[in-house]
Amino acid sequence: MYSQTTRDIEVTVKPFYLDDQSSPGDSHFVWAYRVRIVNKGKSTVQLMRRHWVITDAIGRVQEVKGPGVVGEQPVLRPGDAYEYTSGTPLPTPSGIMVGTYEMTDEDGSSFDIAIPAFSLDSPHEKPRLN
């Protein structure tokens, strides 16, 4: 698992390879990732937008931006947690994802929180030390 806290909001990500949806012979590798967002602060916040940067094993970059996550813009009161699962395909057997969530607080002020970088590793490639 990968975890990072920004402005008292903790984001934890757990990626997992989806063998049943992947087709290595066709250069199609699929991962799901489970995200847990916990508001450890003292004010209510809302997740408004997401921004992902997805890089495959040969350095090709794809950016994904949009409102909310999985069709929702969750409100997190102090102590609340929100979880969702999503996924991404890649044409290579490994890659990396990193990103940010744009949040608003009770005053209507916007700020970004970090989504920790996490590795997408399939069993079809030997792990490499970087």
Image (cartoon, rainbow, N blue to C red):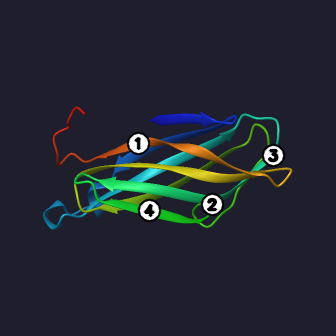
Q: Where, quadrant-wise, is the N terminus in this rendering?
A: top left
- Comparing 100 with 121, the one in front is 100
- Where in the figure is residue 73, as x and y percent of width and height? 69, 61
Tell whether 103 sits left or right of 129. Answer: right
Task: Specify which label sits upstream in the sequence, 2 or 4.
Answer: 2
- Determine the secondary structure under disc 4: strand
Kind of residue at badge 1:
Phe
Task: Specify which label sits upstream in the sequence, 1 or 2.
Answer: 2
Task: Specify which label sits upstream in the sequence, 3 or 1.
Answer: 3
What numbered label is drawn on residue 49? 2
Kind of residue at badge 2:
Arg
What numbered label is drawn on residue 44? 3
Q: CA distance from mark 2 to mark 3?
A: 16 Å
Residue 36 in the image: above or below residue 74: above
Q: Nearer the viewer, mark 1 or mark 4?
A: 4
Task: Specify which label sits upstream in the sequence, 1 or 4.
Answer: 4
Q: Are marks 2 and 3 in contact (CB under 8 Å)?
A: no
Task: Name the residue that disc number 4 marks.
Answer: 63
Mark 1 surroundings within 10 Å by alpha-carbon count, few (fewer than 14), some (14 through 19), many (20 or more): many
Q: CA distance from mark 3 to mark 4?
A: 28 Å
Kind of residue at badge 3:
Thr
